[in-house]
Every structure is written in C-alpha cells, then in structure tokens.
Image (spheres, helix red, strand yellow):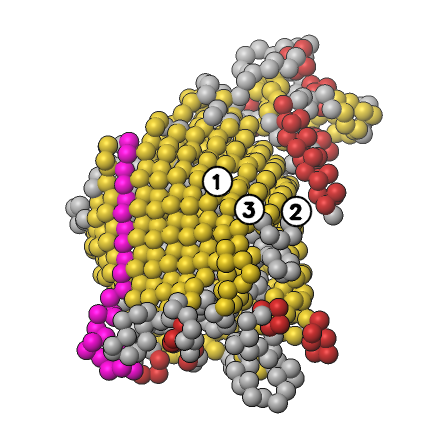
C-alpha cells in the first residue's frame, strides 16, 4: 500500500510538472465521422483528458464538421480541421488545460494560425480578503475569477486571507463570497501580475460559522456550515462540531468521540499548536473564548497531511488579528462566565492588538447557598494577540494563552483546591509570500499543561501534592506552491521537544521527567487531473525519539480521490493512516493526575489507525446532502483492566493493550429556505475492542460505542433582528464501566451494561440590535425542555437548575 501511494504521489507530481508542457502535440485516435463542433470538443476533452477553454460566442458550436479519414492525429491538427477558417491561437495552461483564443478579423485561409501556437504568458492575480472596518483577514472565503472565455477559476483564502489565481490576460470578473458577508464583485482588466485588496462588509445579524472541510462542484473549496445556536455561550463555535455526522458528544471537558474513537484521539490546536485537555470542568464553558476566535476548523475521516499525532480528529482554532482601523470593545455576560474583549490599532492599518478574558461568576454566589447547591468551581482564561503587517504580503504576530480551572471541596474552611488545571501557550508567527506562487508560514511556540490534585482529598496522606505536567517547545514551517488554480504543492517540517512529569496513583515513575523529541516532515500534492477528477496525496513522516526508551519511525500516507459527476453531485474516497504517541486513559469523566497520561514509553507502543471512507455529496442551492460510510482499524489500544486497584503503583498490571475497529454510516443535511435554516445528522456505527487478557470474552463494545446518534437544529429568522432555534439530540446508551469492585466476577460483567436511550430538546431565542457605532445582543434559552439526560451528564453543568434537570441560560453582549 505504501509503495502504491508513493507511486501515485510521484505520478500526480509529474502531472503537475507537465502542466507547463504542451498537450496540443499529444496524439488521439479518431474515426471518420460527422459531428458538431461542440461534440468534437467534448470528444477531445474526454479522450485526451484535457480541458479546452474557449469563448463559445466566437465559435459556431452547432456547425457540423466531417472527418473523412481516421487514424491517429495530434490535438492541434485535429483542432485545425475543426476550426478551419477561424483565426486563433493555442495557449498552454497549467493542469492540462488548452486555451483557444479566437481573434476577430479576417480568417487565415491556410490555417497556419491554427498550428502556430503562440505562447502567451498567463496573468496572475494575488489578493487579500479582509473584513471592512477592521481589516481582519478572512479564512475560507471563496474566490471565483471568470475570464473572457467564460471559464471559471476558483481559489480559497488561507489563514492569512490570501489567494492566488492564474488566468489568460484580458477583462475578468472577480467574485468573492463568504458566509455572513455581502458578496463582492468587480471587473478587472488583467494584463499581467496584479495584487488586489478585497474588503467584505458584514451582514447584520450574521451567524458565526465553523469552517468545515467540504468540496464544491468542480473545484476544491472549503464550505462554511451554519452554527448550532443552541449553546450556553453566545459565541460558542464548538457547538457546531457536536452536530456534525460521526460525532458523539460527552458532557465534560469538550469530550467528543469522532468516528468511534476515544476522547484522547482528538487533537486540539490553538494557532497551530497542541493544547492538552482544553475543556473546562464546567461543561457550559466552550474550550476557547469565541469572541477572540476567527475560525474553528474540524477535520475527521480524512486528516490533511500536515497534521499528525491523533487517530480520529483535528480541531484547529485560529485567533482574530484585532481591528487595525478602529477601537472596539465587547462586554458579555453568559450564564457560565463574564467576558471582556478589547481590540484596536496601535499603529493604524499596521499594528493591532486583541485582548480577551473570561471568568466564571456563579461561584461568587456560593456563600449565599446551601452546601449542596454551591458551585465549588471557578475558571478563567486569557488571550492576547499582537499583529503587525510589514506589507501587503508579510505579517508577524505574537499570541499568548492562559487558562485555569479550580475545583474545591464543599467544606467551608477548605482554601486549597481539590483539582487544579492550567494550560499556557505562547507563540510567534511569521507569514510571507516569497513569490506570487510560493508562500511560507513559520512559527515557534512554548506550551505547558499541568494537572494537580490535593492528595488528602483522595485519602493519600504521605504526599503534599499530586501532579502531572507536560512542557513543550515547538517549531513549525510550511511552504505552499501554487503555480495555478489546478495544482498545489505543500511541504514542511515540525519539530517538538516535550517533557512529561508522570505520576501513577500518587507514586513517581522511574523517570520523574521523561524527555521526548519529535521531528515531522510532510509533503502533499493537490491536483485536478481532469475537469471532473481531483486527487490529493501526501505522506507524513515522523521520527519519535524518547531519551530513555525505544525510538519509532512512522510513515503516515494520506490519499483522497474526488469525482464530480456533475455540478451538483460528487463521490469521494479517502484513505488515512494515523499514529498516536500520546496516551490518556481516564479513571473518571474528568481529567485528574490519577489518570494514565504517558507518551509511548515503558513498553507502551504507539496506537495506530487505518481509516477508509467513501461518500456521496449532493449540493442544493443553499446547502448540502451527504451520505458516507467508513471503516477504521485500530492497533495497540489501551484500556483499564476490569479489576483495577487504584492503590497499586504498577501501571503495567492495570493497563490492557489490544486492538479494535469501528465502522459506521452517516447522513448529513443542511439547507435554508427563505427565513428557515436547518441541519440534521444521523450516524449508525459500531466500535469494538479485544484484548489478550480477555480472549474468552472475544470482541467487546468500546467504551465510546454509541450505535445511534441523531442531532438536529432548526432556526427561524423573526424579522431582521431575531432568531428562534430549536435543537435536539438522541443517542443510544453508552457502556457503563464497573463501579462495584466487590463483584464476584468482574471479568464476566466487564462492558456488559449500557445506559438507556437518552434524548433531549433545547431552544433559544436571539435578538440583535445595531446602533450607529455599537451592537447589542440578547439571548436566552432552556436546555432540556423535554428529555431524560443522565445524572452524570448534568453533574458537570455548574449552573442553576430547575425541576427535572432543566437548565436555563442567557446572554447579554454589547459591542462598542
């Protein structure tokens, strides 16, 4: 399989390299026949696997052309017969594309103009798409450039808002689209390389969006899916992830399971760097402050080549740069937290800042409540980003993040926290365009994750504090080469130095600090092979180097093939191999230092997964209907032994190693009609595991095996300023772990019990009013209007609860 994928990669690379070579002299075999010009053009495209670009207004497409002799003929010679009498020239373009430029004026009777292929350089259009009034760069905006021949050329903006398109010179139409912003259109006389700045105006009452990897029609485009507004925070972009197909959500710590995987198989990135366990004890909190986020990109199934380190999904969150033109302040009060965001220019249109902070507030009421009603919990986080534009194509930024959670016991005189989490990340980023076709993004970062507990609260008297930590230093660089809109090459390197402080049930392991070094190299080709066929193939190589343990070399190929049946239908097949060197097996629903948190050392091998996925997408005018199926094989999975004893200090006795698989079918649909918007997903799946120590039990359901998951949300716009949303969730019961260690046969009852079927219906109402220079947003709702969520699920909603486990929530946000 590896040799096969490498050969495909080399083949596609050669296809991209040959884009500059002439396809007009390639040979076709034709039969004597009569057909219209349009039919002949279609035959050439199909048999020659090329794209013909032309202006049909200058050619009589219904004229019948007869070939009296058959045999082999070059494409240029065949075109000379078809276009006899037309003065034209052929221009080679990247991606096996041949431009037919018909010139006005007298015809060249001898047809010499048809065979003299006058080479004319393509024009290149670079640009930056930003938000009007703030100069915030927009990720995932769709660019459509229509040339004089009526052909469309597509691009999508990157994280820095940039794009690059090549096209024949002449009068072109530029269209830019982005959800929540007014469309942009402009006519450009493109005679050579040119740079444009595009400022998009926000639409009033625009819903924030989550960027999801999708494909539109004939080109590789990112789509933006509507957000699920049934969320506790007014700016919770992560609520959308929980409604996507293949995802089942837990209540604590942003704990999700993607395509049958465990929670530690999800990679969380902030500004491109890992954040460990980013969720909060209070499940009403979103992992990051939505008021400072630009986008949240979610990848499952097919993982892009530049990512590695987890088996199931990647959640990549990007911060906004801050307003470079005006000073803007946002104050918000949600049910879980109060938030303040300040942003503005330090040097106008050059250097900007954005500072955001959140803090829970319900715990301030603890002193007025009875012991059983207290929150006993507080959380706060802080974000800072400074962004400097050196010129239109080069920028430098610095970002900082600090997040802390504390949980206290219910005793009034207890001042020491029972649990304490902290995450820190400091990063420096440099982005530039070396040439019109080559860009580079380089970053360095330092991160820290700590998890502490008060041992005395857990009955351990011989330790002052119990903790586990991970300290990290990262360096990333990525190059992107885009010679045209039909071919893209990406390659880069990532380096990491990490140190783990590992604890096992309160006892130190052999190495208190375990140093780990990692080097990752990746290479990726994205090419449109034919007008309908698109392929992406790449390899990620990782060298894993623990100082005191066995070293590993990992080769992780990725392959994606997509075929557009027509403008509205697409079929695809994906293949990914992932390897994970980080292990986290939890003792409880929330993260504690008692958990098994360890890199791949001490005989614990890295986990691997091979993921195969196939699907069909149908594009409606305003949405998408998608049907997909997947199969994932897993190896070297870790789980807790049935009769685990938390007082034993030897992890090797209580961690089992085994294999597993998961498979499923998903259906996803979102659309809109007039004032209505809706989305729904259903997943039927099965996830199994088997272990050597439990051979007699065979294949067992995984802890995260949830056979049926149904999610949905419907929104209705009431006038121009109000939105009513109703959402729901239904899922099969989850596996219940043994909690009765006095049972006579823990092995026989291991993973045999399930929670009953659970369902829930929520609703929210949002009102937004814009004034001359400010904006007011009000939102309130009720979680679990009707349903039977489990007691464990409600445990981590630190909020006011009313009868039958219903949770009211509300928001007031003011931007000025």
Classify residue 519 by image quadrant.
Answer: top right
- Up the image or down, 205 lies above or below 48; here it is below
Callout 2–callout 3 Cβ contact below 8 Å: no
Image coords of residue 72 (percent x, y): 81, 24
Q: Label 2 belongs to which residue?
A: 553
Quarter of the image for residue 691 reads bottom right
Q: What element carries label 1?
A: strand
Give the CA distance from mark 1 to mark 2: 19 Å
816 sits left or right of 270 in the view: left
- At mark 3, the secondary structure is strand
Going from N to C along the chain, the mark reached first, 2 or 3, is 3
**Mark 3 — residue?**
517
Residue 80 in the image: state x and y as whole percent: 69, 18
Nearer the viewer's eye, disc 2 or disc 3?
Answer: 3
Task: Evaluate whether residue 562 shows in this view.
Answer: no
Measure the alpha-carbon separation of dots 3 and 1. Answer: 12 Å
Position of residue 367 relative to residue 618, above or below, is below
Residues under numbered marks 1 and 2 in contact, where contact means CB atoms less than 8 Å apart: no
Nearer-the-camera pick, 711 or 280: 280
Q: Name the residue under label 1.
A: 475
Q: Is residue 419 left or right of residue 589?
A: left
Going from the N terminus, do you reach mark 1 or mark 2 first? 1
Q: Which of marks 3 and 1 is nearer the N terminus?
A: 1
Which residue is painted at 41% across and 34% down in the image?
430
Chain part drawn in magenta: 350-374
Asked if the magenta segment contains residue 507, the reply would be no
Q: Does residue 78 appear to the left or right of 782 in the view shown?
A: right
């Amino acid at each position: 399989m590896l040799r096969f994928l490498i050969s495909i990669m080399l083949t596609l690379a050669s296809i991209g390299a040959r884009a500059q070579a002439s396809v007009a002299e390639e040979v076709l075999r034709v039969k004597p026949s009569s057909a219209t010009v349009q039919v002949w053009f279609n035959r050439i495209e199909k048999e020659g696997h090329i794209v013909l670009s032309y202006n049909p207004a200058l050619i009589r497409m219904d004229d019948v052309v007869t070939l009296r002799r058959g045999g082999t003929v070059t494409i240029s010679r065949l075109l000379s017969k078809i276009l006899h009498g037309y003065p034209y020239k052929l221009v080679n373009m990247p991606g096996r594309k041949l431009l037919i430029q018909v010139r006005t004026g007298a015809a060249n009777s001898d047809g010499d103009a048809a065979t003299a292929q006058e080479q004319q350089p393509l024009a290149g259009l670079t640009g930056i798409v930003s938000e009007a009034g703030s100069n915030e760069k927009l990720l995932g905006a769709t660019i459509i450039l229509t040339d004089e021949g009526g052909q469309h050329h597509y691009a999508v903006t990157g994280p820095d808002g940039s794009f690059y398109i090549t096209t024949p010179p002449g009068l072109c139409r530029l269209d830019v689209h982005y959800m929540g912003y007014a469309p942009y259109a402009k006519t450009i006389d493109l005679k050579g390389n040119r740079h444009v700045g595009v400022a998009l105006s926000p639409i009033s009452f625009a819903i924030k969006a989550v960027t999801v990897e999708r494909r539109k029609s004939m080109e590789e485009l990112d789509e933006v899916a509507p957000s699920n507004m049934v969320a506790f925070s007014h700016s919770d972009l992560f609520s959308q992830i929980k409604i996507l197909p293949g995802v089942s959500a837990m209540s604590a710590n942003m704990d999700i399971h993607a395509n049958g995987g465990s929670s530690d198989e999800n990679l969380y990135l902030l500004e491109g760097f890992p954040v460990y366990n980013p969720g909060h004890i209070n499940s009403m909190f979103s992992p990051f402050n939505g008021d400072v986020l630009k986008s949240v990109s979610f990848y499952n199934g097919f993982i892009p080549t530049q990512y590695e380190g987890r088996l199931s999904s990647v959640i990549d969150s990007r911060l906004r740069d801050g307003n470079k033109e005006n000073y803007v302040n946002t104050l918000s009060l949600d049910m879980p937290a109060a938030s303040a965001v300040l942003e503005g220019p330090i040097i106008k249109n050059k250097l900007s800042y954005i500072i955001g902070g959140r803090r829970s507030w319900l715990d301030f009421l603890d002193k007025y409540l009875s012991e059983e009603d207290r929150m006993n919990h507080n959380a706060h986080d802080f974000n800072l980003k400074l962004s400097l534009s050196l010129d239109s194509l080069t920028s430098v930024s610095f970002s900082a993040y600090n997040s802390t959670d504390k949980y206290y016991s219910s005793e009034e005189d207890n001042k020491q926290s029972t649990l304490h989490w902290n995450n820190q990340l400091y990063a420096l980023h440099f982005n530039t365009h070396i040439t019109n076709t080559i860009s580079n993004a380089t970053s360095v970062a330092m991160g820290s994750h700590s998890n502490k507990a008060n041992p005395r609260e857990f009955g351990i008297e011989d330790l002052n504090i119990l903790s586990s930590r991970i300290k990290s230093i990262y360096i990333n660089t990525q190059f992107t080469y885009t010679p045209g809109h039909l071919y893209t090459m990406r390659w880069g390197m990532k380096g990491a130095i990490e140190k783990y402080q590992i604890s096992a049930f309160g006892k130190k392991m052999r190495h208190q600090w375990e140093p780990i070094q990692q080097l990752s190299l990746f290479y990726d080709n994205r090419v449109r092979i034919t007008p309908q066929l698109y392929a992406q193939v790449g390899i990620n190589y990782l060298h894993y180097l623990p100082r005191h343990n066995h070293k590993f070399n990992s080769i992780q190929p990725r392959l994606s093939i997509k075929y557009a049946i027509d403008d509205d239908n697409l079929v695809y097949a994906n293949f990914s191999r992932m390897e994970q060197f980080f292990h986290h097996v939890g003792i409880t629903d929330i993260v504690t230092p008692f958990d098994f948190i360890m890199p791949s050392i001490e005989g614990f091998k890295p986990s691997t997964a091979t993921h195969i996925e196939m699907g069909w997408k149908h594009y409606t005018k305003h949405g998408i209907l998608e049907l997909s199926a997947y199969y994932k094989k897993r190896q070297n999975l870790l789980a807790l032994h049935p009769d685990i004893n938390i007082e034993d200090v030897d992890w090797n006795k209580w961690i089992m190693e085994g294999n597993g698989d998961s498979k499923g079918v998903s259906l996803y649909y979102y659309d809109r009609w007039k004032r209505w918007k809706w989305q729904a997903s259903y997943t039927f799946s099965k996830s199994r595991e088997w272990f050597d120590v439990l051979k007699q039990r065979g294949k067992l359901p995984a802890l995260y095996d949830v056979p049926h998951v149904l999610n949905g949300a419907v929104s209705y716009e009431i006038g121009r300023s109000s939105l009513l949303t109703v959402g729901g969730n239904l899922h099969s019961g989850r596996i219940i772990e043994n909690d009765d260690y006095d049972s006579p046969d823990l092995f026989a009852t291991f993973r045999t019990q399930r929670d009953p079927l659970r369902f829930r219906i929520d609703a929210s109402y949002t009102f937004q009013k814009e004034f001359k220079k400010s904006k007011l947003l009000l939102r309130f709702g009720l979680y679990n209007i009707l349903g039977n969520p489990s007691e464990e699920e409600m445990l981590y909603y630190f909020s006011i609860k009313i009868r039958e486990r219903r949770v009211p929530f509300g928001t007031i946000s003011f931007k000025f």
